[in-house]
Image (tube, rainbow, N blue to C red):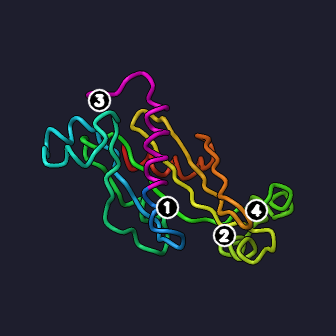
Amino acid sequence: MASMSASHAQHLSAAAREVEDFVSTAGWDQPPQLFALVATDELVQAQPDLATQVDAGSPLTPVAQDALPNDDLAEALAGIMWPEAVQGCAVAQEIVVLPPEVEDTLPAGEDSGDEDVLQRIAAEHPQRREARLVAAVLRDGTAACVLRIRGVDGPDEVVEHPELAPNLTDALLTTLR
């Protein structure tokens, strides 16, 4: 990695926030979006005309990719392989979240049955909240997640933690190997 320092997690978190900020400018009800994370200096070197459009102080620049199919995100990610020039990747997707006390009452594991059933239960629950999740990973396994929970009667709530979506970050890591 050309200009990546020891603070990979910090740079990746900043890139995940940048992706979330970018996606949020289009508002809610957006389809899942995929981004390549490339070294900014390498990008500018390869395409000098982009120098005025990127943050030269940021080691990573998110590059939006073609639209993902709307059906199965896991299946779509399983078919992606990135070239070596891509340092990492990120995906933004809208999800429904439930309070922890409600999630604890849902069937889990083999008892959960069909994933579609759980999604329908969540979508119809009176305490559901809409959210946008951005999960990002680097080739070395570093992960970052940003979750924007849509405000109901006030401002949106933003939560950051690298382990918010371990299954999604694992799926993204697989695209880099």
| Dot placed on the residue nearer the N-terminal end, 4 or 3 | 3
Please identify the quarter of the rendering in which residue 84 is found: top left
Give the CA distance from mark 1 to mark 4: 21 Å
From the viewer's perspective, is 175 left or right of 151? left
Label 3, residues with CA under 10 Å away: few <14, some 14-19, many ≥20: few
| Dot placed on the residue nearer the N-terminal end, 1 or 4 | 1
| Dot placed on the residue nearer the N-terminal end, 2 or 3 | 3
Horizontal and vertical percent for residue 97? 70, 62
Nearest to viewer (mark 3 / mark 1): 1
**Residue 154 is one of the magenta-drawn residues:** no
In the rendered image, which quarter contains the N terminus? Answer: top left
User: Which residue corresponds to mark 4?
Assistant: 98
Nearest to viewer (mark 1 / mark 4): 1
Give the CA distance from mark 1 to mark 2: 27 Å
Whether tag 4 and tag 3 are in contact, CB under 8 A, the answer is no
User: Which residue corresponds to mark 1?
Assistant: 24
From the viewer's perspective, is 57 left or right of 18? left
| Dot placed on the residue nearer the N-terminal end, 2 or 4 | 4
Most distant residue in the top direction? 6
Q: What amino acid is labelled 4 in the image?
A: Leu
> In front: 130, or 95?
130
Horizontal and vertical percent for residue 173? 44, 45
Please identify the quarter of the rendering in which residue 76 is found: bottom left
User: Which residue corresponds to mark 2?
Assistant: 115
Q: What amino acid is labelled 3 in the image?
A: Met
Disc 3, SS: loop
